[in-house]
Image (tube, rainbow, N blue to C red):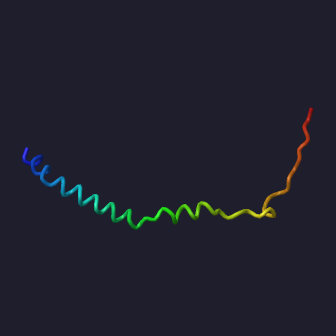
Amino acid sequence: MGIVYLFRWISPYLVTLLFNRLTKKMGDHNPNNFTNEKQNPPKKKQQEMGEYIDYEEID
């Protein structure tokens, strides 16, 4: 019973501590860096592609 009472006194401080740590970690994160890389993928040259083969249908 005493543990629950102690936890009720400590929990607001724990929540604020965890929230502050989370905001500091997320503050360093910049989502624009990742989206810029995904928007401009390297384009393949047509020379890298294989030869086109047209298969005839067998009746």
Screen quadrant of the N terminus = top left
Question: How many numbered badges does the structure rendering display?
Answer: 0
Task: Name which residue lies at 10% across and 51% down.
Answer: 6
Please provide percent x and percent y for residue 44: 73, 62
Residue 38 placement, left or right of 12: right
Could you say which quadrant of the image residue 45 lies in? bottom right
Please provide percent x and percent y for residue 39: 61, 60
Task: Name which residue lies at 58% across and 64% down.
Answer: 37
Residue 4 placement, left or right of 36: left
Residue 50 placement, left or right of 6: right
| Camera-nearest residue between 7 and 38 | 38
Please provide percent x and percent y for residue 19: 28, 58
Residue 5 placement, left or right of 32: left
Please provide percent x and percent y for residue 29: 43, 65
Task: Name which residue lies at 10% across and 48% down.
Answer: 3
User: Would you place residue 2 above or below residue 39 in this image?
Assistant: above
User: Would you place residue 29 above or below residue 51 in this image?
Assistant: below
Q: Residue furthest top?
A: 59
Could you say which quadrant of the image residue 40 lies in? bottom right
Could you say which quadrant of the image residue 55 lies in? top right
| Camera-nearest residue between 51 and 31 | 31
Q: Residue furthest bottom?
A: 28
User: Would you place residue 37 above or below residue 7 in this image?
Assistant: below
